[in-house]
Image (tube, rainbow, N blue to C red):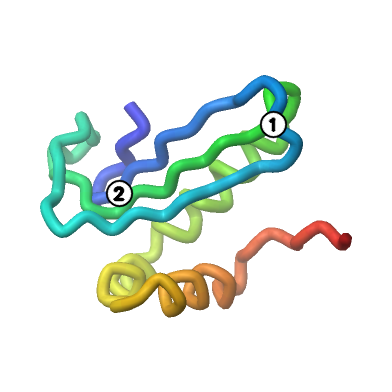
Amino acid sequence: STGLGNGVAIPHGRIKGLKLPMAAVLLLEQPIGFDAPDNQPVDLLIFLLVPEAATQKHLELLSDIAALLSDEARRAALRSSGSAHRLHALICDWPGQPEQPSH
């Protein structure tokens, strides 16, 4: 299962033809069952898609996301963010955020 516990899940996969990793964050008004280790329903999901060949990058991103969501205060802040803009800012301001590629 991609359920981590504490109401959090990270569904993920590798996609043929995808050029760069992509993620989407969802906060659900109504939590859903998700076969998490603590049997708690999930209301905070981060969907992660990576290029098919990015096996190491996939694992690194999963680890980074799990670290972000392992902090109880951070989870609470994400859940109470109130807007997509604030949610994005909270994730981008996280001290453990991986470096962004330069363009």
* Residue at screen point 30% across, 49% down: 8
| Residue annotated with mark 1 | 18
Structural crowding at the residue carrying mark 1, measured as other residues with C-alpha within 10 Å and reported as few (<14), some (14–19) or many (≥20): some
* Residue at screen point 34% across, 48% down: 45
In the image, farthest residue toward the front:
17
State whether residue 60 appears in this view. yes
Indicate whether 56 appears above or below 76.
above
Q: Nearer the viewer, residue 36 or 23?
A: 23
Q: Secondary structure at mark 2?
A: strand
Q: Nearer the viewer, residue 87 or 59?
A: 87
Q: Which mark is residue 2?
A: none
Going from the N terminus, do you reach mark 1 or mark 2 first? Answer: 2
Asked if labels 2 and 1 touch by Cβ distance under 8 angstroms, the answer is no
Q: Nearer the viewer, residue 37 or 62?
A: 62
| Residue annotated with mark 2 | 8
Is residue 56 toward the left or the right of residue 27 in the image? right
Is residue 60 toward the left or the right of residue 69 in the image? right
On the image, the x and y values in percent for residue 28 come to 22, 55
If the image is split into quadrants, where does the C terminus sit? bottom right
Structural crowding at the residue carrying mark 2, measured as other residues with C-alpha within 10 Å and reported as few (<14), some (14–19) or many (≥20): many
If the image is split into quadrants, where does the N terminus sit? top left
Indicate whether 77 appears above or below 99.
below
Q: What's the residue type where badge 2 is placed?
A: Val
Indicate whether 21 appears above or below 76.
above
Q: Secondary structure at mark 1?
A: loop
On the image, the x and y values in percent for residue 60 come to 65, 42
* Residue at screen point 40% across, 71% down: 84
On the image, the x and y values in percent for residue 96 come to 61, 66
State the image quarter where residue 41 is shown: top left
* Residue at screen point 42% across, 48% down: 46
Count numbered badges in the picture: 2
Q: What's the residue type where badge 1 is placed?
A: Leu
